[in-house]
Image (tube, rainbow, N blue to C red):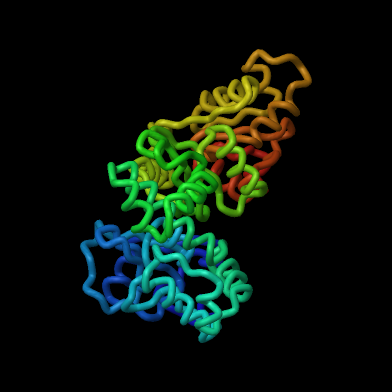
């Protein structure tokens, strides 16, 4: 976000620093009109080209249905978009040093190429500084970003029937052995199994309550969490362990359905989700999560009431609350509908303010809180 300058989107559009985006209509209007005052406030991803741009980009504008919007360059990158070579959205900060501009240009010259520390030094770029800057700006190291893109592309190529030799040499590896080692380490399976294997695709989804990270296998949504959730890294590790699958940035047809149904939910036109979901866990955890799915829209339960409905003995409230907190499918499995026995909000991994807003949207805010 650039200072405190005012734009035509400032009034009533939320706090951009909290990843709250303005309405799609407002962003689309700014993007189509090349409104430079909105540069840095949001980014536009063009699905037909796989490129993301600044609102002011001078390139030919796409059809509106081919445009998605993101609160940050990181979210656009993680959603699988490449930075536009005309407007250079990765360089849209006043505090970007000259060497960082050169680094971005080096990456975008050929994103699939392996760039070693020696090459960075040849360009007068300190590898340590590059790692720190990339981590601060995009949330992952320079090498990790390049490696994830190469591996994701290679995995997709193999699954679509591509030749193993092409996957090796078209994605920056110098030998089969190096590719196999890297593939097994980061993907979790030999490349020969990738034609029938699966992996968990990760992408960001914007909601009125902030960005969420979504995860999907070939057949199911298996993760939906707010990106600033406590224990987020632990949740990702748990998903990888339970499914015995690697986590790789990528897209999935399921994400389109998920995004559509979440929009309907937040607009108040959807009360029940119709998505394939998977939630492996202990028998106790799964029993609790199945109980959460049976709590109707617009109703709440206390932890004790939920335990009673599940046929559990007295004193199970704490265990039910713990299992409730381990839910990895926020909103889809409505753990926000469980409150404290005294009518208080209780806990919520995504933050109590979000739980408050979700209950408000569903019209079931506890009366003692609604009066405050």
Image position, residue 25 (x, y; %): 32, 62
Residue drawn 67% across and 17% down?
Answer: 308
Q: Which residue is located at x 48 percent, y 39 percent?
A: 189
Horizontal side, residue 346 vs residue 15: left or right: right
In this rendering, the answer to whether 102 lies above or below 179 is below
| Vertical placement of residue 186 versus 195, above or below | below
Position of residue 144 measured from the top left corner of the image (x, y, whole percent): 53, 60
Residue 114 occupies quadrant: bottom left
Q: In the rendered picture of this protein, how many numbered marks are placed on residues?
A: 0
Front residue (pair 296, 185): 185
Look at the image and tell me whether residue 12 can be seen: no
Which residue is located at x 52 percent, y 27 percent?
Answer: 293
Is 310 above or below relative to 97?
A: above
Q: Which x, y percent locates residue 49? A: 26, 62
Which residue is situated farthest in the bottom direction here? 98
Q: Residue 197's spot in the image, x, y percent?
A: 41, 35
- Residue at left offset 41%, top offset 56%: 79
Q: Quadrant of residue 4?
A: bottom right
Whether residue 112 appears in this view of the structure is yes
Q: Nearer the viewer, residue 143 or 355?
A: 143
Quarter of the view holding residue 50: bottom left
Q: Tell which of 372 and 327 is nearer to you.
A: 327
Between residues 356 and 104, which one lies in front from this camera angle? Answer: 104
């Amino acid at each position: 976000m650039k200072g405190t300058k005012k734009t035509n989107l400032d009034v009533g559009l939320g706090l951009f620093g909290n990843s709250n985006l303005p309405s799609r209509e407002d962003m689309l209007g700014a993007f189509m009109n090349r409104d430079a005052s909105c540069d840095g406030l949001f980014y536009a991803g063009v699905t037909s080209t796989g490129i993301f741009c600044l609102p002011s980009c001078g390139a030919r504008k796409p059809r509106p249905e081919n445009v998605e919007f993101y609160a940050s360059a990181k979210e656009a990158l993680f959603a699988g978009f490449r930075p536009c070579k005309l407007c250079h959205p990765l360089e849209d900060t006043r505090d970007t040093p000259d060497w960082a501009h050169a680094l971005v240009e080096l990456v975008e010259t050929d994103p699939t190429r392996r760039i070693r520390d020696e090459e960075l030094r040849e360009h007068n770029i300190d590898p340590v500084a590059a790692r720190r800057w990339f981590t601060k700006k995009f949330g992952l190291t320079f090498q990790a970003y390049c490696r994830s893109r190469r591996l994701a592309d290679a995995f997709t190529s193999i699954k679509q029937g591509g030749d193993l030799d092409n996957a090796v040499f078209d994605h920056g590896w110098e030998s089969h052995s190096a590719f196999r080692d890297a593939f097994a380490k980061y993907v979790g399976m030999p490349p020969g199994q990738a034609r029938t294997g699966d992996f968990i695709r990760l992408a960001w989804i914007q909601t009125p309550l902030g960005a969420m990270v979504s995860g999907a296998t070939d057949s199911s949504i298996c993760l939906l969490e707010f990106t600033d959730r406590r224990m987020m890294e632990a949740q990702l590790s748990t998903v990888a362990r339970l499914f015995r699958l690697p986590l790789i940035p990528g897209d999935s047809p399921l994400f389109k359905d998920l995004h559509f149904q979440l929009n309907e939910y937040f607009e108040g036109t959807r009360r029940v989700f119709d998505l394939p979901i998977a939630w492996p866990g202990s028998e106790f955890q799964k029993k609790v999560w199945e109980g959460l799915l049976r709590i109707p829209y617009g109703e709440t339960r206390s932890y004790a009431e939920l335990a009673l409905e599940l046929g559990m003995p007295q004193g199970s409230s704490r265990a039910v609350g713990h299992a409730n907190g381990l839910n990895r499918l926020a909103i889809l499995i409505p753990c926000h509908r469980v409150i404290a026995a005294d009518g208080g909000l209780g806990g919520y991994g995504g933050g109590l303010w979000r739980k408050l807003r979700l209950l408000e949207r569903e019209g079931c805010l506890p009366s003692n809180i609604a009066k405050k």
